[in-house]
Amino acid sequence: MSEDVVHLHKPTDPATPDNAPTVLTVVPDPAPAKPVPLWVRSGRAVKTAVTHETTKATVRAAARHSLYTFNGGRIVARRTWDGRTGARYERMIRAAEAAGNLEAAEEWEERLQRFRAARHHRRMDLLHSPVEAAKGVGIGVGMGVGGLVALGVVMAINSGHVGDVITPLSATIDFIALLIRIVQIVWGPALTIGPLLALLALWSVGRKQHAAPAWALPANVRSSEGEPITPSIVVKALRDLGVPALRKAIQEMGDAGASMLGPIRIAGCGVEVDVTLPSGVATNEVQNKRRKLAENLTRQEHEVFINIPEAARTVRLWIADSGALDEPIGPSPLVTDETMTANYKTGKAPWGQDLRGDAAELSVYQRHLLITGLSNQGKTAALRALALWLALDRSVEFWMGDLKGVGDWAMFDGLATRLIQGPTDDHVIQVTEMVEDAVDEMNRRLQSPPGTEFPLLVVIVDEAQVAFMCPIKDEDKRPYGGSSSTSRYFMAARKIHNQGRAVNVLLWQGTQDPTDQNLPKMVREGAHTRASLALGTDSQARMALGDKAVDGGAAPNLLRPGLDKGTLVVASDGIEIPKGQSSITVRTHYINTDEAAVIADRAKALRDGVITLTSIDRGEERDPLADIASVVGTTARVRTQDVLKRLAVLNQAAYGRWSFLDLKRVLDGTGAEPYKSDGVMVVGRDRLARALANRDGEGSASASN
């Protein structure tokens, strides 16, 4: 029989997983949670019930409808009081006095005197009215009874019964008794229903006026999105603008500031209202708080425009419908109307829409143009849209320099007589020489006999800031860029600005991110039409549009880059601007590259073939006969005036001063002399080809001899 040995001493060997003793850990049961007191549970239940959305909606509805009825009664009582007393006139007098408009105060006081005189006359008439009324009732009753008796006599004579004499009178008495019976029946329910109908009428008045606190109104009314603009909202927004003098004046006005407002007019996708500020409040105090005013009107800053019209102490507010300015406008008429043509002198380019939704059309007649803005905001598209419209006038000639060179103006190849595209210094040099050639053409025209009419020559330079910032100098150390008296591009632009419009030589420039370095003051102020897309600062806005336009409310620096692409602030006498304003905001039609190419093709079809030069050759020996043949091209006959113009484009230095006599001198004796066709002098393609062939044949024969 074996027995287990129990060791009484502790083992000294370290414990291993195999021989380690088992350790049992005893975990006591958790203490029971304390019971939640009844008052805590009740409080939680009450809080849940009170804060539940259904409870909130129920409380809001009950408060709303109760206050509709109560405040509706107040509104009706006030209207009744105003109609029976002179309270309305007294409020208007106090408001006019607070606004400093003494003429209006005197006019309202005169109206009050007339109202009181008329009321006194009515009250005096009431002293005599009881006697007059009694007389009228007696006479009416007597005439009525007499009429009924006469009718009864006629009936008695007709029927032969004497009793019929009182039949009409008896029927009338019976009818009156019936009416009394009906009134007796209806009177009881009417006493019950009448007050309910009166309360319903008061509720309806309060509901229409939203006569309840904002927290009690329905969600769709409480929402700031799309809240309609009413006089009370405008006055409250002005009162809370943070201008102490304005707030005090509104509080002192008897009508709570309503007299400051002109009529609220629907204007396109928004409304417009003129606000006459009270004495002591300057217009710029309101103008400088555009963001706060917009927020008070529950609008975004870009949805509120503040202009200063001609009237003293008046600001004109245009308030867009919420989100309306984010909606695109329709396509350009240039795209939709394939029969459209242009007229440089009398026509206007369909550029876009103003904020009212009306068509914004620009006259370019004898007006230099400048468009600027931040990069990638639609400057080239806006400038190109004007050029495309003008191209539909076949008499207009284009010289173009695109210093970006990505193909934005490529559709003018075959339409413009010069088209230089590229961003390098060599391209700047060629564009500068092109503008200088325009100066030479301008001088030639200026020296022509008085009364001579010239076709329009438009010189367009896109990304002109590249030319102004070009560091290259010519062989005489004259810089192409810069704004000094030796800067070639700057001086050429200034000369065209000074005298070009008189002989229909115009300069249109597009620039970006203007500074004094890349858009010199004398150049930007030489443009008759100045337009700006979104800009970064107020100083840039003043560079783009001038101090007068910015002081009058123009704010391209408040346009949203990226979101307001194609939106221009325009200062020009060539576009219809509301009276008293110095600028107008235009949302331009966007014409993409493919659509522009289609319009350009229509413009090319109006012309008799245009050779586009993509570079300028200078200083090389010319072959006049070959050059004449090259500018005539494949056209059977070209007018001599067009030949001279094309030769000048081909080489301004060699042919810029040519006249008809020079052309005739070169062609005489060659067999390609100018001749008349349809009453005009022309040069024939076939005759030129024979003249060149004969000359080349004679040259070959001479060489062989």
Image (cartoon, helix red, strand yellow):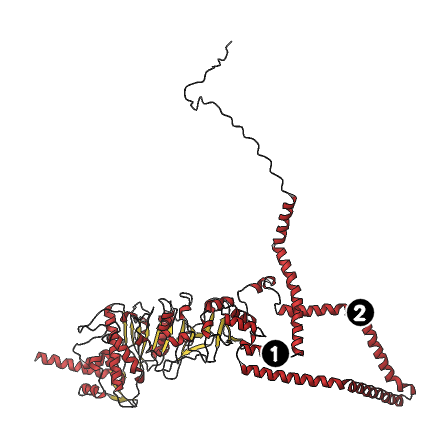
Instruction: Measuring from the top left, give residue 667's x and y in whole percent.
Output: 19, 86
At label 1, the amino acid type is: Glu
> Is 173 drawn above or below residue 675 in the view shown?
above
Foreground: 674 or 419? 419
Instruction: Measuring from the top left, give residue 501's x and y in whole percent.
Output: 32, 83
Instruction: Measuring from the top left, give residue 133's x and y in whole percent.
Output: 78, 85
Helix, strand or loop at label 1? It is helix
How packed mark 2 is, by other alpha carbons closer than 10 Å (few <14, some 14-19, many 20 or more), is few
Foreground: 166 or 184? 184
Foreground: 379 or 701? 379
Say the numbered circle drawn on residue 617.
none
Residue wearing tag 2: 188
Can residue 66 be seen?
Answer: yes
Q: Residue furthest left?
A: 705
Quadrant where the C terminus is found in the figure? bottom left
* 210 sits to left or right of 269: right
Residue displayed at 69% across by 86% down: 121
Residue wearing tag 1: 90
Q: Are marks 2 and 1 in contact (CB under 8 Å)?
A: no
At label 2, the amino acid type is: Gly
* 699 sits to left or right of 248: left
Q: Nearer the viewer, mark 2 or mark 1?
A: 1
> Is 29 drawn above or below residue 562 in the view shown?
above
Helix, strand or loop at label 2? It is helix
Closer to the chain start, of discs 2 and 1, is 1
* 228 sits to left or right of 359: right
How packed mark 1 is, by other alpha carbons closer than 10 Å (few <14, some 14-19, many 20 or more), is some
